[in-house]
Image: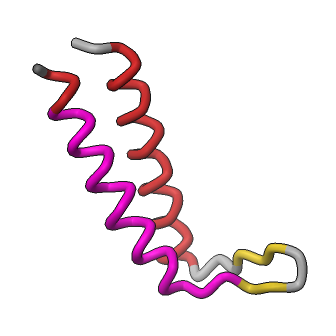
Amino acid sequence: MRPFTTIAAIIFGLMALLHAYRLATHFQLIIGSHTIAQGLSWVAVVLTGLLSYGLFREAKR
C-alpha cells in the first residue's frame, strides 16, 4: 500500500461526505457576499467521490 495515496483518498472521501451532508441538510455556504449554489455540491460529490475511489484503487496496487 502507498501511504500518501491512501491519505489523499481519505481526504477526498471526507470532502465528498461533507458535500453530501451539505446537500442533505440544505446548509447554506456563504463566501463573502456570495451564496454558493447547491448544484455545485452535486458536482463536488461526484468529482471528489470519483477521485477518492480512483486513489483507493491506486493505493492497492
Magenta-span inclusion, residue 20: no
Residue 4, relative to residue 25: is it above or below?
above
Number of callouts: 0
**Direction right: furthest residue:** 32
The magenta segment:
36-57
Q: Position of residue 43 (x, y in %)?
A: 41, 74
Residue occupying image coordinates x 38% and y 55%: 48
Residue 44, relative to residue 7: is it above or below?
below
Could you tell me which quadrant the C terminus lies in?
top left
Residue occupying image coordinates x 44% and y 67%: 44
Residue 27, relative to residue 2: is it above or below?
below
Magenta-span inclusion, residue 41: yes
Residue occupying image coordinates x 33% and y 25%: 6
Could you tell me which quadrant the N terminus lies in?
top left
**Direction left: furthest residue:** 61
- By what rule are the colours in the image chosen? secondary structure
Residue occupying image coordinates x 26% and y 55%: 50
Quadrant position of residue 22: bottom right
Q: Main secondary structure of the magenta part?
A: helix
Q: Position of residue 28 (x, y in %)?
A: 70, 80
**Viewer-proximal residue among 39 and 18:** 39
- Position of 18 with respect to 13 (left or right) is right
Quadrant position of residue 45: bottom left
- Position of 42 with respect to 38 (left or right) is left
